[in-house]
Amino acid sequence: AQSVTQLDSHVSVSEGTPVLLRCNYSSSYSPSLFWYVQHPNKGLQLLLKYTSAATLVKGINGFEAEFKKSETSFHLTKPSAHMSDAAEYFCVVSGGGSQGNLIFGKGTKLSVKP
Amino acid sequence: NAGVTQTPKFRILKIGQSMTLQCTQDMNHNYMYWYRQDPGMGLKLIYYSVGAGITDKGEVPNGYNVSRSTTEDFPLRLELAAPSQTSVYFCASSYITSGLETQYFGPGTRLLVL
């Protein structure tokens, strides 16, 4: 069965410093992996997705993630945090099958201090 | 395009009451999904539909029903509301031909059952 583990429930950074949100996955086959962001009282927005092409995936708003099969990781990074990055971030793996089901991690809340 | 829209945004129900959460998408997507998000947790799949007239259970279907009479609409029905159904409900849609495609999420419906 597929699963994801987000290693930090809360990350706090200062504006202008790097962001690292950690995610490990478990999958019985080559997975598709996603990062979604949820701003307060908003729906989820896709940041980026990995679907077995390039292992370094670039997303919106300066975020990127690297797929490392040997470490079963898909960490999300950004070189310089902005106040508007404060949100909840979800690492997601495809659940397999024909229905396109997604398996969500529990989320990491990112706080950005001025 | 409005994307995925959900109504209502917020609702308070008494135990045993029923209600329908509405979801509409205008992107001609074939797949639609209902998720619930409990505090501090990721999203869990309730029901999904691969096209008009076809629905199937997800991970947590008990206490819910769905129908899909048109491509655009995918309402979620709660027949006998229980406190355990207090949650935020998200509808999503995607266009899947082969492989996994991005899911687009609505803004959510916050439900409180007292």
Image: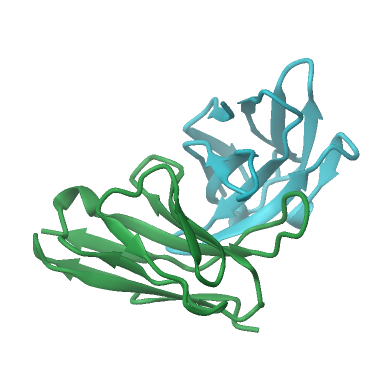
Chain colours: A cyan, B green
Compared to residue B6, the image places residue A17 above or below, namely above
Residue drawn where x is 48% and y is 64% of the image: B91
Say whether residue A112 is visible: no
Q: Where is residue B99 in the image (x, y as percent from the top left)?
A: 76, 49
Residue B70 picture location, percent across and down: 52, 79
The residue sitting at 42% across, 42% down in the picture is: B59
Left-right relation of A108 to A74: left
Residue A54 in the figure: left or right of residue A24? right
In the rendered view, tell whether residue B83 sits above or below residue B29.
above
Name the residue at 72% across, 26% down: A29
* Residue A58 in sight here: yes
Image position, residue B73 (x, y; %): 48, 77
Q: Which residue appears at 32% of the width and 61% of the height?
A: B65
Residue B46: x and y, percent? 40, 51
Residue extending farthest to the bottom is B1
> Residue lying farthest front?
B53
Q: Compared to B26, does B19 lie above or below?
A: above
Q: Which residue lies furthest to the right in this view?
A: A54
Horizontal arrangement in the rendering, residue B65 relative to residue B85 (left or right)? right
Front position in the image: B71 or A33: B71
Q: Answer left or right for B71 relative to B12.
A: right
